Amino acid sequence: MITLSKLAKTFNTRDGKVTAVDQIDLTIEKGEIFGVIGYSGAGKSTLIRMLNMLEVPTTGEVSVAGKNMNTLSQRKLREARQEIGMIFQHFNLLWSRTVAENISFPLEIKGVPSTERKTRVEELIKLVGLNGRGASYPSQLSGGQKQRVGIARALANNPQVLLCDEATSALDPKTTDSILELLIDINKKLNLTIVLITHEMHVIRKICHRVAVMENGRIVEQGPVLDVFRRPKEHMTKEFVKQVTEPEETEEALKHLFTEEGIGHVLQLTFVGGDAKRALITDLIRKFEVTINILQGKLSQTQDGSYGSLFINVTGDEHHIIEAIDYIRKQEVEVEVIHGE
Ligand SMILES: Nc1ncnc2c1ncn2[C@@H]1O[C@H](COP(=O)(O)OP(=O)(O)OP(=O)(O)O)[C@@H](O)[C@H]1O
């Protein structure tokens, strides 16, 4: 559905040239929810804005739904943009228009007749769960409801692609989850391709099929979400994965533990799918002369299955511990010795 080849954007500023996006190649399939994660300044906004030519690339190509966006005339570009809806962090609604009038706006621009518009707006209001709020003004809505209006408006012209620019960053965690559920629902119902940018790994975990990690204008790592969670390669990716697998206080608590006498080995185990439900710890205690103390565990769900993260403290004779670690590795469970090696 989307292909980027050698895509780059350089801004000329008073302080010199800034390369916001640096030679990106990327393919996004139809019906996929694809996430781009990175810290502030990584180039995510510039990248997503080049997908619909809100930002014109310096070099490289963007193809969406079979159209080469770089070469289109202004008129053809306007048409092509109707295939690409977009939602924003701060919703970008028209404050003097009601919910129904906001959703109707892109249909008016397209010249859809009034009765047809009304029916379509009603459909969209239902789709995003805003029944009965059509006559309200944006100022009378909660943040989550405002984003629902943004989504309905973005979908008005039946686009094939929805771009989400930090769409949940201004919302609290519960509202974020409800908007993410809505996006999953729409993706399934309409087979809509969704591209989102975010700095929160929770968003990626919850809804994306694949993820790309961006740093300094480049994609440093990409893959299916479950694979990236299981075996993050780059330092940056590991940091993002930690956002989900380790509550903030874990690192501090573990460091404190390492200062204690006779602490032995501390291991972090990562399980995926069916492995997450196996009785590995029971096996270890039965098979090897080691003592195991569970420090912390967490099971999380992604779009493609579950994965678990477990911190354990293993004590015993060194050779028994090494045997136990070898055994864990043979079970296709990722193990990282974070203390004691
Ligand atoms: N219009 C512009 N003019 C000059 N420099 C820009 C412009 N837009 C972005 N940049 C620069 O490009 C780099 C990437 O910015 P971009 O906004 O794409 O990153 P981001 O990952 O989306 O971060 P954020 O979430 O903070 O917006 C930054 O160094 C930024 O200062």
Image: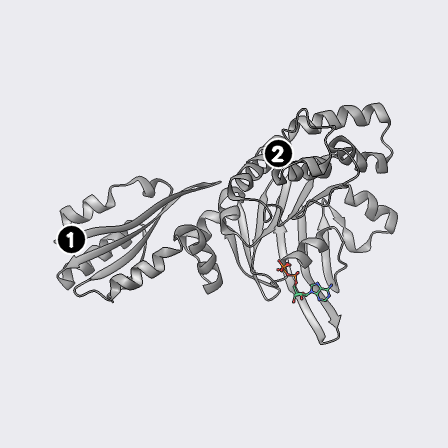
Residue 46 got which mark?
none
In x, y percent, where is residue 111?
Answer: 87, 34
Above or below, 332 relative to 238: above
Q: Quadrant of residue 31?
A: top right
Q: Tell me, yes or no, if residue 202 can be seen here.
A: yes
* Residue where numbered disc 1 is placed: 291
Q: What colour scheme governs how the chains and residues are painted in the rendered image of this protein?
A: one colour
Which residue is at a point 38% across and 42% down the rendered structure image?
273
User: Between 265 and 330, which is closer to the camera in this rendering?
Assistant: 265
Residue type indicated by callout 2: Ile
In x, y percent, where is residue 174?
Answer: 51, 39
In x, y percent, where is residue 22?
Answer: 65, 66
Classify mark 2: helix, strand or loop. helix
User: Between 293 and 50, which is closer to the camera in this rendering?
Assistant: 293
Crowd rating for badge 1 (residues with CA inside 10 Å; few <14, some 14–19, many 20+): some
Figure quarter occupied by ligand 1: bottom right
